[in-house]
Each structure stands twice: as C-alpha cells, then as structure tokens.
Image (cartoon, helix red, strand yellow):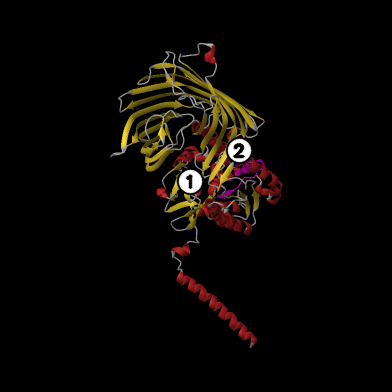
Amino acid sequence: MVLRRGLALLLLCALASLAGAQHSDTVFPPEDPLRRVVKPIQIGMEAFSSKMEAIKALGREPLGLVLAGGSARAYAYIGMLEVLEERGIYPDFIVANSMGAIIGLLYAAGLSPAMIGELVTTVPIEKYFDLVFPFNGGLINVDAFEAIMKDLIGEVDISELPIPVIITAEDLNTRRKTEIAAGDFSRVMSSSFAMPAIFEPKAFEDALMVDGGSTTLVPIAQAVPHSSLLIVATALYNRPLSYGNPITVLNRVFDIGKTRTGMEDLLSASPFIIRNDVEGISYMEFSRPKGIILRGRESAESAMDDLVRWLPPEAVQSRISPDLEAKRKHYKETLAPKLDAYRRGALPRLDASLRLSPYWGLLRPIQPAYVGIDMLGFGGLGIRLAAGGTRAFLGGLVGLGSAQSGNWAVTAELLTNPWDSLIWGSQLRMLGDFGNDFPYLKPESLGLSSGLWWELGEENKKLEPFVSTNLEYELTSGNLGWETETGLSVAALSLGGSSGAKEGIGNASSYYSLRASAFAQGGALPFGWGPSLGLGAGLSIADSACLRSKVSGRSALNGAGMGIGRWELYRGKAPNILAAFSSTASIELAWYARALEFDAGEFLLGNSVELGPYIDFLWYTSDGYPSSKADFLPKTFTAGLSLSATLRIAGLNPLELSIFGGVSDLGDFSFGIRSGRLFPAGY
C-alpha cells in the first residue's frame, strides 16, 4: 500500500511538471520573440565548428583564448600575447568581445603583438571617434576608425583569418546575443565595441549591433562548447568609487550586471585565468598604452609557470602555423608605411556620407591653426560631408567674441588629403554682430583662409613645410586686408625613461623645435614683409619635472607696424600698439603633477597634468630689428603660474587645456584659458 501511494505521488509530481512545461509552451510558444531572446543568433558558426572538429580529429583538444572586455585596459592583452608566444603557446581559436575583440581580431588576422602595440601607439583609437548628434542611436561615430582598419587589414572576412574567431555582440532588434564567426573584418570590429548610447549601433546583416560586453564582460560561454582547454584573460574594473554624482551611479549600475554575469560564467567553467593587473585603470586611458601593455606582460609572466604545467604538452608549439606566418610577413611589409602616413596626419578614406553635426571651439587656441576662425568660445551646427580623403562643412556658429570681428559666423570649409599626408584646407566665412532690429544680424566682414601643409619625418623627428594665406574684407569700411606666410617647422624628441614620450608625461629627456618662415601683409594692413622665427627646447628632469623655454618673434624689415602678441603668445597684457619688431621669450619649470590627475564618474578623465611657475618677456621696437642696447632689454615681463592638462570626455579625442595667471612688472594681472599647450606634454 505504501509503495502504491509513493508511486502515485511520483506520478502526480511528473504530471504537474509536465503540465507546467506545457503551460510555458502555451504562453511563450517556440516562435514567440520573447522566448527566442534566450537563443543566440549564430553567424558562420557551422564553418567554425568544423574547424574545431578537424583539430580534434588530429587527437588533441583545441586551445581557446578568451579575451574579456575592458576598454583601454584591454591593451594589457598585447603584453600577455607577447609572453604566450615566447613560451610557444598559440591559440587555436579566440573568443572575444568589446575592446578585447579589437586586440583579438588584429591578432587573429596575423599581426604580431609587437605590430598591434605599434598600431595602438601610432594611431590613438580615440582620435578617430567623431561626436555627432544622436540621430542614429549614439553620440560617437566610428566611420573613420572603421576605414583605417579596412585600409590596414584589407577587405577580409573573419571566417578566413589564420586563427578562427568568435566575436560576441548584442542585437537591438531581437534582443538576442549574436555569435559572429563570419563577416567583414572592419564591420565586425566596430560592432564589437559599440557601447550602447555612447557609440552608434552598427548594422550587420539583419541585426543592429551593440557591444557584447554590455551584457557580459567575459564571453567564456561561447567558448565552452568548442573546447575544454581554455585560457581566459581578464581586464576588469575594480576600485573604490564615490557615488556623489549620478553619472558614477549610472556607470556602476550598468557595470553590475555585465560584471556579475561574466564572473558567474567564468566561475562555472574550469579555464586557466590570467588576471591582468589593470583593474584600477580608467576605461578612457587610451593615452598610455605602453604602460598598460607592460602590466599585461608582467601579469602573464607571473602566471606562466602555472600555465605551462596546466597545459598538455601538445598545446605548446615550436612555431606558428604557416598561414599565420605568411600573414605576418605580409603585414610586416605593408603595415609600417600606412601607420607612418596616419601618424603624420593622413585622413582615412571614408565612404560618401552627409550628416548634421555639431561644431565648436570652447577656447581660443594657443597655436592658431593654418585655417580656422579666431572666435572665443563658439559653437553651432551644420552639415558635414565626407568622401574619400575630403571633408567639408557648412554651418552657422555663435561665439562670445572674436579677434577678427563679430559674435556669430557662417562658414564653409573644405579639407582634402590628395596624397600621403599632404593636406590642403580652405575656409570661407562671414562674421558679424547681433543688432536690435530685424533681422537682428549685422554682417561685418567676409574672410577667406587657405593653407597647405605636409608633415614629413620619422616618429620622433617632424618636418613640416607650410604655406597659408588669409584675406579679410570689412563690409562697413570696404577695406581689404591680406597676409600670407610660408615656411618650415621642425621638431625632434630625444626619448628617455622606460616607456617613451607617448606615455604622456615624464618620459622624455629632451626636445627642440624650430619654426622659420617669411611673411607679407598689405591692403588695409600696413604693407610689410620679413622673417618670422621660433625656437623651443625642453629638458626632462628625473622623470618628475622639466625645464623648458621658447623664443619667437617676427620683424617687418621695411618698418611696417604690426600688432603685438598676435603671432606670439605672451601670457600677460600686451600694449595695443603697432611695432615693426616684436618678440616673446617664455621660461617655465613644470612639475608632472600626477597627484592632480582625476576621473569623474568614468566619464571625464584628466591626466598628463603639469603645474609650475613661468616668466614671459616681451620686446618690441618701431624699427624692423633691435638697433640699440635698450632695444635688447625686454619692455615688460609677466610672471605667474601655469597648469596644463589633457581632458577626455567619454573616450572622445582629448582636449589639451592650458590655464595661466600672473602679474606683470607694471602690476597688471592677467588670466587665460586656452586650448592646446605652449610646450609638448612631458618636455
């Protein structure tokens, strides 16, 4: 009797369980979009699985390498890969997402770790992120970055790479995870790190992709079905935060889910883990790749003995595969000249596009561009066009003031890169002020600027010939002024320290610069011509401070009057007079103020901070050159304190900022905020 009752109870439980399953199928039938959310989309996975089965048929388990997300922290994987190769460890396949996918795809394509390191230091990733209006789901467009990858790697399908890969992303349309093992290389890469709301989602086949790391940082679940022999490398974020601002709270909430899921998947498997010592580094630290690469190398070295013991002997190879070796030989020949051109300013070749775009200049630059508007704190919007190596913009701006005239501008700009790093730019503009009567806009001047420049030289030796012309027509008076300049700019860096000048601060031992040109002006301006010269030098002291100086000036040899301080930065109050000769000299002692570096909510990052005293001298004469002993003595000088820093917002191209304040020998106080730096960071 007891046995019968027990069997009956078990039968009832089974029926109840079956009824529950049937109820779920009824509520969420197999084709229901919500039910399908849990089933990943697979692209190219059949061919990938076949490759893994072919390896198993040889009698060994495929060695998989999983690269977790981590933004700039993922640079650590470059150093880790160096150490793996030194021990003869080469993965049979790679699974990655987010920034880990960038490193993983480049490595799988055939670039050596050294080549990848050269790429990320030569072509800073954030330089090719463009801020746009969020009409396409994000604030940052990466078309330029995608074009560079296509140029460097070629139009390659990732299913054809020497090392098979799986890249994970999330499809906004279906809310399904996507496992990508086939598709255009550059498009897959840009899809892999499209952080939601920050980067524009990327269309890929029928999907609209965002960063796979937004739901899980460690994509090990996609690797487990293909092998039990897995190495997982992490570049997680783990440091105390202050929750006094909502951006930090939002970032942490976003981080909780993806980190928790990643850790759950990681702990449920049995991989070998290389935990890279980068967990206290901001995701925006793209400016210091060499230091992060070094940390990755050190982390891998500390784990290597355990890894070698853990791996079966057949997983350690004596050499790379022939396919991978052939690709490395190819990229060794083609990569360097292309990287060199981008380092010198070559523009990526973009597909034709037209979009509404913001345009702004928060601060007046320390070093004026060859072509541009000299307005203080301007902003606006317009239509931006791009095609190949040509960029164009048509729009309207509003500013706080101008060295030319007016508080608003309408501008049409054209920038083209016909060959190598040769750039030609031109700008046509109308500037004006605001009136009290309709139409409330008072045009005051028309202007045209045009320039041609070509940066040459090696990485630490710059040579740049240039020519520029500027025309300014005042509508009220009918006066037309013009000026033109042609010359040569030279700079050289002598590197010291452990990681090179590109790490930002404190690593360069010395530098020098020279800028020599000839100028002419006329029309509404007093006709004048003559030479212009600038010299600069810096010396880094004990990796903690630097002493630097700069001298510049120009002379109208025919005695024509020129405005003082227009061409040379004098961080004081310059007299409002015309002089045939004017010159400034700056001496500065800067401390590399690492203690002042900061990040706010992982949204705003400030680094490469330099702080120190300065003294600026100013000379001017009515003749074209100093002609007496008194002329060799400075007319005035200003001493004060200067602070320079690099600001990064949400991973965008950084803003160089200089703040200075001082008092002159006459008791005049001065204060200024400019974009750019008077001296290169770290010298």
Q: Nearer the viewer, residue 517 or 92?
A: 517
Amino acid type, mark 2 = Lys
Residue drawn at 36 percent across, 28 percent down: 448
Image x and y of residue 267, in percent? 63, 58
Q: Is residue 544 left or right of residue 194?
A: right
Q: Is 361 located above or below residue 558 in the figure?
A: below
- Magenta-tinted stretch: 76-96
CA gap, disc 1 and disc 2: 23 Å
Residue drawn at 69 percent across, 51 percent down: 310
Which class describes the residues within 10 Å of circle 2: few (<14), some (14-19), or many (20+)? many
Image x and y of residue 336, in percent? 53, 32
Q: Identify residue for label 1.
A: 190
* Magenta stretch holds residue 419: no
Circle 1 SS class? helix
Circle 2 SS class? helix
Q: Is 644 located above or below residue 12 in the figure?
A: above
Residue 369: in sight, yes or no? yes
Q: Nearer the viewer, residue 675 or 144?
A: 675
Image x and y of residue 147, in percent? 45, 40
Image x and y of residue 304, in percent? 69, 46
* Magenta stretch holds residue 92: yes
Circle number at residue 290: 2
